[in-house]
Image (cartoon, rainbow, N blue to C red):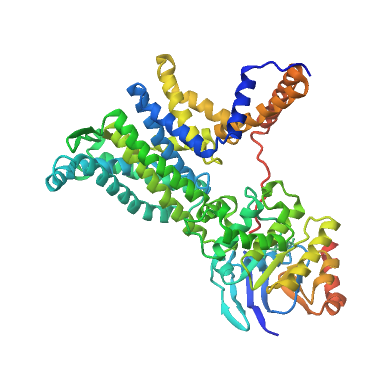
Amino acid sequence: MTTVLKTEELRKQFGDLVAVDDVSLEIGGEEITSIIGPNGAGKTTFYNLLTGVLEPSSGSIWLGKEGDLREITDDPPHEVARNGLSRSYQITNIFEGLTVRENVQVARITHEGRTFDFRSRAAKDEELNEDVDELLALTNLTELAETPCETLSHGEKRNVEIALALAIEPTVFLLDEPTAGMNPTETREIVSLIRELDEDIDATFVVTEHNMDVVTDISDRIVVLAEGAVLADGEPREVLSDERVTEAYLGSEA
Amino acid sequence: MSIRDESIGDRIGTFGREAIRNGWTRERFVLLGLLGLVLVSLGPPFQVYLFTEFLIIALFALAFNLLYGYTGLLSFGHAMFYAGGSYGLAIVLRDLQPHIADTIGSGIAPLVTFVIGGLIAVVGVLLLAIPIGWLSVRLEEIYFALITLAFGMLVYSFIIQNPQGLTNGTDGIIVTLGITEIGGTELRLGDRQTYYFLTLAVVLPSIYAIWRIVHSPFGTICKSIRESPDRAAALGVNVTHHRWMTFIVSAVFVAISGVLIAGLANVASPYHSHWTTSAIPVIATVIGGATYFSGPIVGAFVYLYVRWGISRYPVLEAYWEFFFGVMLIVVVLYFKGGAAGGLVLLQAWLLDVRTAYERGGTSEAWAFVRESAAEKQRNLSARLSNLGRSEPSEGAER
Ligand SMILES: Nc1ncnc2c1ncn2[C@@H]1O[C@H](COP(=O)(O)OP(=O)(O)OP(=O)(O)O)[C@@H](O)[C@H]1O
Ligand SMILES: [Mg+2]
């Protein structure tokens, strides 16, 4: 297994609350890893630490290709992104006031380092828009390219979320509850999209998810977080039949 | 349907469509616009003056809106760059004019000094904007507005204190543009018409430059920061750095408008750096519509011409700020897109009225007008009763 993302004793405290409790994980490049756990288990906080949005209380984060890991613990979010770690958000976070095309352009412009290319006009730049079109096709958004995002349906916005994250050609793609708030049809569509993308694209997918059908459907490996700590880690079948895991979930529902 | 009577509205509509069909493309409309701009110069001197001022304020507001409408940062201190432009020019004219005249001869010295003064002023503002911007963009939202306001007041008090006679205190510095002689012909730069064309020659390319910036990849990144800074950062955008760059670009164009106002008003006045001057582009942009490129231009027009209209009635003039207050409230409550947005809506509405008319004649059109007016009324009262309650905002999880 080649590791693409690694944490060592990663910890985050908010006052007395330990949101992420000394998590040490190695994510392999060839598998889809799901991180599951009851509400408040620390999944989103874990993502925020990885992407540099929150500063860890202690521990370290490493990222890289082909076993060549670099420490990114103290990098600000934009550098983490440039180093190849991309994410989608649990609560949809896209550029609502812009069109779908413009949304993806943002990612491509920074990725290609063309921010200061004042000779270019974004709307008419062929080189830029070729790449954008390719991504839109990949995420089933071609027909919506010129639509302002604020008028999209929830499911479509979630697709834009994914297109944005992929546009920077990440090494690792963290998805935070991709099916949140979706109806069954939309859920089925996004799951098949994620599977297709995993085949077509060189990125490693890490997914947090509440929908257990989705989890069993796409995961090669499951990591269970409870109260910030790793409770179980391994093959889906093993992990889901683990008594402590069922207990953690039942306990949270009671 | 009855036989169409050829009303004036109909004829204008037909004329417009015909014109477009007959190749009245954008280029031709631009030509027509330029012709209009030339015609303005033939008006009475005061009208030429007013229109020149409009062009300058339009550039001021457009440059401000690069930061506000496009990047989402409300600066309340842009007068410092405006004053930087006007004082830069005034100081160069006062202190360097004789030296320049000695070197290149007094004939074309006034024009050359104006150009050099303008350039020095803009570079000066650039050097000022680099550190001020660097510090300011580290803060967001209201804190950004406050720190820019504070820097603006600092510059104002610096000017008032007249360090070593540099700024001439509360009186400001008189700007004399002089008489340029080129090949025997005399050119009075300060002449209303001449200065109007000079302003046009500077403002039009500046507007075009800002337009290109807004539509370049740089502008796309600006808009992404306005929409969601943390999302932009998660895609690799260095948000702070980009805000800083935008701040500097904005300041430079404001400086250009400041240079022009000093030449027009014949003075670099402390008023140019006062916070009430910082409010001018804010008001113009809000009235005109921050989300439209042309919004600040439309707003500057409304601002200056309404003020002029009010100033003709001494009874009203004492209360002109009151009128702008009312206007701002109406715009904020009623026209989210400002006047430019209002014009777009009006156009769409007129088309709808027209469709209704074509469907069922006058009675149908009238019914549509009444219906949409009633709807506006309902919307407004709904919004008024919602005032104090804030809408739930859907933000990013941090
Ligand atoms: N910025 C913050 N300040 C204080 N406490 C926080 C902050 N962010 C998260 N927490 C707390 O940390 C804990 C973990 O929250 P987190 O959002 O990471 O959980 P989660 O596993 O993503 O839950 P969900 O499944 O509901 O998304 C919660 O108790 C939450 O209240
Ligand atoms: Mg979460």
Q: Is residue B43 above or below residue A106?
A: above
Residue A206 position in % (x across, y down)? 72, 71
Image quarter for residue B382? top right
The one nearer the camera, A234 or B284, is B284
The single residue placed furthest to the left in the displayed view is B102
The one nearer the camera, B106 or B127, is B106
Q: Is residue A125 above or below residue B168?
A: below
- Whether residue B164 appears in this view of the structure is yes
Q: Quadrant of the N terminus of chain B?
A: top right
B86 horizontally vs B61: left or right: left
The single residue placed furthest to the front in the displayed view is B22
- Whether residue B283 appears in this view of the structure is no
Q: Is residue B31 above or below residue B370?
A: below
The tally of labels here is: 0
The one nearer the camera, B35 or B256, is B35
Residue B16 position in % (x across, y down)? 59, 28
Q: Residue at x 34, y 32 (%)?
A: B196
Image quarter for residue A104? bottom right
Q: Residue at x 57, y 55 (%)?
A: B229
Q: Quadrant of the C terminus of chain B?
A: bottom right
Q: Residue at x 59, y 50 (%)?
A: B227
Q: Is residue B134 above or below residue B275?
A: below
Image quarter for residue B105? top left
Residue B47 position in % (x across, y down)? 37, 24
Question: Where is ligand 1, by quadrant?
Answer: bottom right
Residue A34 position in % (x across, y down)? 76, 72
